[in-house]
Image: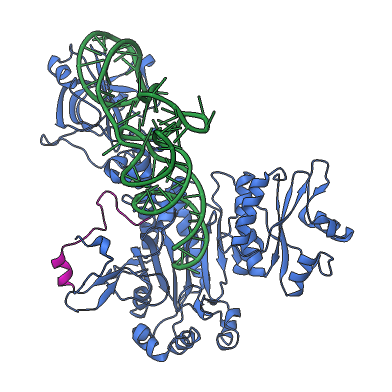
Chain colours: A blue, B green
Amino acid sequence: MEVHKNGFSNRWKWSGEKMMRTHTCGELRPEHAGQTVNLCGWADTVRDHGGLIFIDLRDRYGLTQVTFDPHDSQAAWDAAQAARGEFVLRVTGVVQPRPAEMVNSKLATGGIEIRGTAIEVLNRALPPPFPLEDAKAAKVSEDLRLTYRYLDLRRAQMQRSLVLRHKISQAIRNYLDSQRFIEVETPILTKSTPEGARDYLVPSRVNPGCFYALPQSPQQYKQLCMVAGLDRYFQIARCFRDEDLRADRQPEFTQVDLEMSFLTAEDIYSLIDGLLADVMEASGHPRPALPLPRMPFSEAMGRYGSDKPDTRFGMLLTDLSDLFTGTQFKVFATVLGQGGVVKAINAKTLAGASQGTIDAWTTLAKEAGLGGLAYIRVQPDGSWKSPIVKFFSDAEKAGLQERLDMQPGDLILFAADKVDVANLALGRLRLLAGEEAKLIPEGVFAFTWVTDFPLFERNADGGLTSVNHPFTAPHPDDVPLIETAPLKARALAYDVILNGVELGGGSIRIHDSELQARAFRALGLSDEKIKTMFGHMIDAFKFGAPPHGGLALGLDRLVMLMVGADSIRDVLAFPKTQKAMDLMMNAPDKVDARQLRDIWIQLDLPAADEEA
RNA sequence: GGGGGCGUAGCUCAACUGGUUAGAGCGCUGCCCUGUCACGGCAGAGGUUGCGGGUUCGAGCCCCGUCGCUCCCGCCA
């Protein structure tokens, strides 16, 4: 079977006379010479030379040049004069190879052109409000592109992204099918739960005062699928979270959600390793070496200052606490005396960073909780320029020199604080400095697993929250810590990271109702609350729940990284703005008072907004 | 909720320190043009400088507010 450059097999062969087109605009080659063809598409450009008119006809598959010469057909030439950009056209003509000097090597179809004998304007078009050439459209303000998204999506670049997204979804489905997974759809109208993000709520007409929630993920359903004995479940599932947006966060997004029974974490790692390798291949990238690298959470935080380490470059955090034990430098001595740490990164080549840059980084370090940002500039002659080195002993200087491998041109940035604060601050600075120093290579795909996440963390109210979610199994060695030292307990939880972006994560779940109850109690949930919120899960686990676990991958982020986009908006057909608006549909919008009455909603808005 | 950036013709941008009639390229319209593929040439139309208020003899420019888009923190896996 012939496979086209666009990746789609050529399954269709038109011959019926009712068909509007015989070929697509990306298909014709010199071997089609002499054939009479029909093409349909949009006028990409119209170049009218007076006597001779060129129209580049465009569809999803490519671009084909059609010529209209009055000697071929006076009527077609007359009609072609009316064509304008983005008109929808159907042309009839004869495929003709181009003489060597007229071949357009930039076009897949550049070896031929169509000598047009008839043209039909299927639809006229207003001039588009912004240019549809990729190079120009990339600079157009995004709100305009979003308002006319159907035009933005005509661009080759956008179509490539959507096609690749489809290819990736297909690769994932094929892979999981080959691994005995079955795709199961779970409800979109479901129940609100207290953990996690803010829910999108949907009022119930037939149950006054009650609300569904849109799922933040199909988490509970997929676990219940395991209790049901489905063994291996997956779903390419839409998820909803009512939180503020980012370049990589939309209010609705898509997860590759999966769950399996009778497994260990190793089974998940190798399963997802294979899946990601297939995704890379489907995206036209080389398959990564397997198994993908792994590091424990403690190492990610300690060396990269992040739970989603960007392993494309070094500049790792170096712990200098032991070197400065007993130092005369009061700032370090005080921190160390209180059980804190002194850590540093070597921002290679950035000794010449402007004071403005250093000031900006200092501001950022303070936002991260640091008291200030100490630094050393290593001068071209190897000497150190710094407000703090005068406090260092010779031994301390020698130790720094050796551990940080300080070379002329280097900039050393110090953080002295509680370990979590120092890691977080240096982790952020590392990313900025790495970018500033151009240390982050293009076109590299650095995957890593982060394993052994903590089970709990302290929340703003001083209580405990699940790092992952409350069904996450503790590490078997750490079960007793749930009551005695919950913050020290590790979880059987893991994230998979690509280039510093969290692609997804998951865990082995608790399948024992007793252990699950202990975990809920550690979170400070009352027995009554456990029953109303999670009673169905506890009940289910009493009926023979198998050991199970799983993971969810952010499909939007995965596709974004595969196509090299900066935002998941670029790989979504119809994304929302930062204020969660759909500018094309103008959603959300006000609704009729009667609709509100039906669902028992009464608005009590500030006076300024009382229309509607 | 907080901090930063942006907002001038359909699009992308320019407009000195606040100073006369707000310009350019692309696009659009008309005419000319038979080998272009970023076609070319000539002519032309097109502006509530996001919106509201203020300062000033005078505001695209300064101040206050507001709206929209965007990046980040908080929030969110």
Q: Relative to the observer, which residue lies in front, A504 or A143?
A: A143
Q: Is residue A588 magenta?
A: yes
- Considering every residue shown, the one lying at the far right of the view is A394
In magenta, the rendered stretch is: A579-599
* Number of residue marks: 0
Which residue appears at 57% of the width and 72% of the height? A452
Which residue appears at 72% of the width and 74% of the height? A339
Does residue A236 appear in the picture of this structure? no
Q: Determine which quarter of the picture holds residue A6.
A: top left
Residue A318 against residue A39 in the figure, above or below: below
Residue A385 against residue A118 in the figure, above or below: below
Q: Relative to the observer, which residue lies in front, A563 or A429?
A: A429
Q: Residue A77 in the image: state x and y as whole percent.
A: 17, 17
Give the side of residue A583 with respect to residue B19, left or right.
Answer: left
Which residue appears at 55% of the width and 47% of the height? A444
Q: Residue A39 in the image: state x and y as whole percent.
A: 21, 30
Does residue A232 appear in the picture of this structure? yes
Quadrant of the image containing the C terminus of chain A: bottom left
Q: Residue A272 in the image: state x and y as whole percent.
A: 47, 62
Q: Residue A275 in the image: state x and y as whole percent.
A: 45, 58
Q: Is residue A220 magenta?
A: no
Residue B22 against residue A289 in the figure, above or below: above
Prevailing secondary structure of the magenta residues? loop
Give the side of residue B19 with respect to residue A480, left or right.
Answer: left
Q: Determine which quarter of the picture holds residue A199.
A: bottom left
Residue A379 against residue A549 in the figure, above or below: above
Which residue appears at 20% of the width and 21% of the height? A116
